[in-house]
Image (cartoon, grey):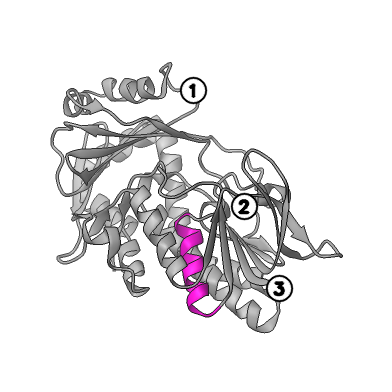
Amino acid sequence: MIDVIIAGAGPAGSVTALLLARAGARVLIIDRERFPREKLCGDTLNPGAVRLLASLGLRDGPLTEALPLRGMRVTGPSASVTGLYAPGVTGLAVRRRDLDTWLLQQAVSAGARFESGLVARRPLLDSTGGLVRGLVLSPPRGGAELRIPAIMTIAADGRRSILVRLLGLRSTRPRRRRWAFGTYAENVAGMSDVGEMHIRAGWYLGLAPVGSGLTNVCLVTPPRPAGRTPLEVVQHAIARDPTLAERLGRATFDAPVHVLGPLAADVRAPGVPGLLLVGDAAGFIDPMTGDGLHLAFQSATLAAESVLRTLERGDYRDAVRRLAAGRHASLSAKLRFNRCLRRLVDSPSAVDFASRSAQLFPGLIRRAITYAGDVK
């Protein structure tokens, strides 16, 4: 029997696998996709994420060629504030297809095994039904099922995790849902060495330089945005804002527009006995603050610590409690911050008030940029 099976080879799953394999655990990672693969994302690591990867000895690969980001520019309907990080502190702009492939390779090099073309269909339960002891897998388009037993299971299969749904962990609390549209553009005017977040009432647009003259363009909208195609949705949002229309008036969109949604999924608990959640499976938030990858890496380190303790002591129920306590201590303040910003975007009057306040008190926005970047 393997020690740990991980469903999902994205950043959270791969970092969890890396830490477990380094500690001597027998780890199997499965994913429906073959790598490299494209992934809708803002393509940025904030300073906290860069620092965490460095603490794990992860400093090379695509990070050596990534563009450094010295800060963030945040704009509203009537204000623009640029916040620069401290000297020597930077974020990085790196394409997710490159980052994810490299992190998975690091996990495999540490001793984890990876199998692509497999989907987690349901948890494998013990005879009592109260303990997850592995996964039932099959190819994406169906086929013969595989029953893979494991001492511990990690669900890192994203915000729409079937394991979360089948185990009844998804929160049913209603909230307004948003959709993300991501692509790459050439000839975006005025790009520099800072990331950008343009917040408007009900929607926002992120811009990040990724090298070779390309800019990551990530639009987050409410349901049913204007436009017949994903590209038209992006173009319509840009055209309705004079500042953005001027900046992107000559931009060319050569890459496909990827769509992701609905965003913002919550869970009731970070796992059940025998199975823990990491990354977006443990709760997905809007990517407005640019700290999604840092939160994913933090959740991975916390889950790995809890799994190793369980492998040593066999305390399956305590594993969930430990992970919940660790997440609360490490992540709760940042998650509250993100939720507050998400609510602000929902209110046109709040966006207008925040924009006018930024004109009078730009230091408040700069402090928020530093906090969002996890700068220490």
Give the residues drawn in magenta, as a range: 10-24
The single residue placed furthest to the bottom in the displayed view is: 313
Tell me if I can see residue 3 in this picture: yes
Q: Earlier in the sequence, mark 1 or mark 2?
A: 1
Residue 340 locus on image (x, y percent): 44, 47
Q: Relative to 278, say whether 229 is above or below.
A: above
| Viewport quadrant of the N terminus | bottom right
Relative to 84, is 311 above or below? below
Identify residue for label 1: 224
Name the kind of residue labelled 3 in the image: Tyr
Q: For mark 3, does the 10 Å Cα neighbourhood hold few (<14), some (14 to 19), or many (20 or more) residues?
A: many
Q: For the residue labelled by badge 2, is the local secondary structure a helix, a strand or a loop? A: loop
Query: Which of the 4 image quarters holds residue 293?
Result: bottom left
Label 1 Cα neighbours within 10 Å, binned few <14 / some 14-19 / many ≥20: few
Q: Earlier in the sequence, mark 3 or mark 2?
A: 2
Gap in Å between the C-alphas at discs 1 and 3?
43 Å
- Residue 23 belongs to magenta span: yes
Q: Is residue 190 left or right of residue 197?
A: left
* Residue marked by disc 2: 267
Q: Disc 3 marks which residue?
A: 316
Image coords of residue 40 (percent x, y): 40, 41
> What residue type is disc 2 on?
Val
Q: Is residue 169 magenta?
A: no
Q: Is residue 268 above or below residue 131?
A: above
C-alpha separation, residue under disc 1 versus residue under disc 2: 25 Å
SS for dot 1: loop
Task: Please state which amino acid type lies under the numbered disc 1.
Answer: Arg
Measured as percent of width and height from the top left, residue 359 is found at 20, 41
